Amino acid sequence: MTRLSITKAYKMYVGGAFVRSESGRYFQVSANDKSATGADPETVNIPLGSRKDARDAVLAAKNAFDGWSARTAFNRGQILYRLAEMLESRRDELTASLQRAGLSAKDAEAEVGASVDRAIFYAGFCDKLTALLSSYNPVPGPHFDFSVPDPMGVIAVVAPAKPALLGLVSTILPIIAAGNTVVAIASKDDPRTAVLFCECLATSDLPGGVINVLTGDAKEIAPHLAKHREVAGIDAWTEDAELRAKLEAEGSDSVKRVTTHGTPVDLKWYDAADPQVGQGLGFLERFLETKTIWHPVGV
């Protein structure tokens, strides 16, 4: 008797809902670790995002921006802390998913633990950001002059291929902690862990559209995000030098803030003190603008 392999269909996360690609296309991902899924490797169907999916995600992020940026910093911190709780509550599922992608049990547990810690870190930073980045500027004349940070709007992220979960968490959470909204392209190496992360987003009180996660080929989707006039910035983590150059060129046409990075070695993502791939104020500053206000004295 022939045994059938298990096949599941996953969906992308756009506007607070799980959706298929409008193109109907998909690609298949099989488990690298058979012991994580039984005798046969589990094969899953993952939506292959298209240009239309990218436009839909940008629209959802744009519609969510005003409401998200207008929330108090304390409230944003509460929501991110709730996300950390949801990640913790599904620790076993996330660990198993990373194991299916080929990580050892020890490495998978470490990555999930670091992801929870990073979510808590940025939750705590939400209501401290303005105090740390604002300044009172001594100027001549009868004016108060002070500068405060402002979110930019919709930010596109090309998440690193590895680590699939910690890389996604580390790149998108500082962006939304600062009041922006995000359209992210998940790792194509392990998209099912990204979808499981999205299930945590859906139950974390995060408003729909604040984080949108597409699956598929970054080479196909990212250039369209770079051209999109409603996208204010791009943060791309990819070893593909040609793609990095293309995003910089396409983004310059609409004067986007584009930052590109070659993917660092996995272990550096766990170094909280590393300003390049760890955590800290630099990640929060990356997609903020400074607004300077002049106010007449005595008025």
Image (cartoon, helix red, strand yellow):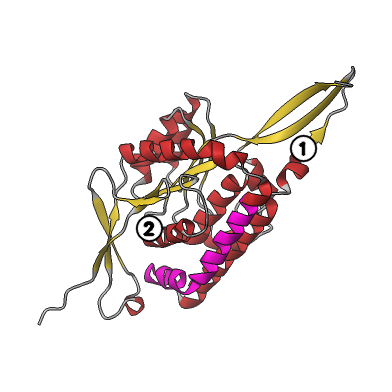
Tell me if residue 277 is in the magenta stretch. Answer: no
**Which amino acid type is shown beneath numbered disc 1?**
Ser
Q: Nearer the viewer, residue 280 or 75?
A: 75
Q: In which quadrant will I find the N terminus?
A: bottom left
Q: Could you tell me which residue is drawn at 71 percent across and 49 percent down?
A: 127
Residue 122, image quadrant: bottom right
Question: In the rendered image, which residue does mark 1 sit on?
Answer: 134
Vertical relation: 93 (above or below) 159 = below
Question: In the rendered image, which residue does mark 2 sit on?
Answer: 191
How far apart are the two marked residues, 2 and 1, measured between alpha carbons? 38 Å
Which element carries disc 1, helix, strand or loop?
loop
Can residue 163 be spotted in the picture?
A: no
Predominant secondary structure, magenta span? helix
Which element carries disc 2, helix, strand or loop?
helix
Vertical relation: 13 (above or below) 86 = above
Which residues lie in the magenta part? 76-103
- Could you say where residue 118 lies in the image, as x and y percent from the top left? 61, 60
Outermost residue toward the top? 141
Q: Nearer the viewer, residue 79 or 239?
A: 79
